[in-house]
Image: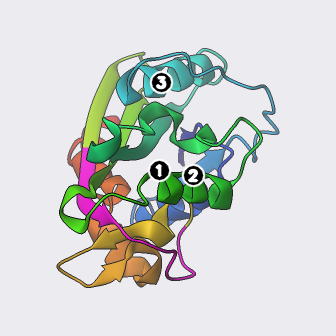
Amino acid sequence: MKKIILATQNAGKIREFAQMMEKYEIEVLSLLDLNYTDEIEETGATFEENALIKAREIASQYNAIVVADDSGLEIDALKGAPGVYSARYAGDTCHDDANMDKVLAELKEVPDHQRTARFVCTLAVIDEQGKETLVRGTCEGKIWHEKRGSGGFGYDPIFYLPKLGKTMAELLKDEKNALSHRGQAFKKLALIMGELL
């Protein structure tokens, strides 16, 4: 059975990726499964650069297809912030609530029509021969004024989808996978999955 290593220790990302990969006869391993605890420094200025840094590091150590994701939130009123710093926007040791609280505080005086934002996900894939592929998915929305919903992770409770009248955290699992930035990136990955496998 083919193996794909997902180069993350993020439980939410692992869960979503495993759900999307269910239809393929492959074994999905995460860095948690490999007991890989080294910190990979994300020194890139873009999601693409960071995804490749992670993918290359893991591919250099394991003989498998490696998929690394770098994703985050871009808010137009904050000139694209938090961007590549999404996971540590409120500080290196901060958690999702602190990051969301910082965003909400910074947008407190910003009117609805200027609260446009998008989730971005870049997947870097390196196959066993070392070939590198990048795919990118986005999901457009707005920043809501308060946290709503208990699903998802990260900024999902404040990311509002106007067409649905819900935040990302209020969506059912299948709804989120169909619409999310990660879901969009994965659809593009699925198009090349046949070649990889």
Element carrying mark 3: helix
Mark seen at residue 61: none
Decide: is 127 above or below 174. Answer: above
- Residue 174 placed where, x, y %? 37, 79
Judge whether residue 71 can be spotted in this image: yes
Q: Determine the residue positioned at 49% across, 60% down.
A: 104
Q: Determine the residue positioned at 42% across, 26% down.
A: 127
Residue 132 counted in the magenta span: no
Query: Looking at the rendering, which quadrant does residue 37 occupy?
Result: top right
Residue 144 counted in the magenta span: yes
Q: State the residue lying farthest toward the front.
A: 109
Q: Name the residue tied to disc 3.
A: 50
Q: Name the residue tied to disc 2.
A: 102
Q: Residues within 10 Å of mark 1 (few under 14, many from 20)?
A: few
**Cβ atoms under marks 1 and 2 closer than 8 Å:** yes
- Residue 12 placed where, x, y %? 60, 60
Q: Give the mark, 3 or 2, whose residue is nearer the N terminus.
A: 3
Which span is picked out in magenta?
137-152
Judge whether residue 128 can be spotted in this image: no
Q: Name the residue tied to disc 1.
A: 106
Element carrying mark 2: helix
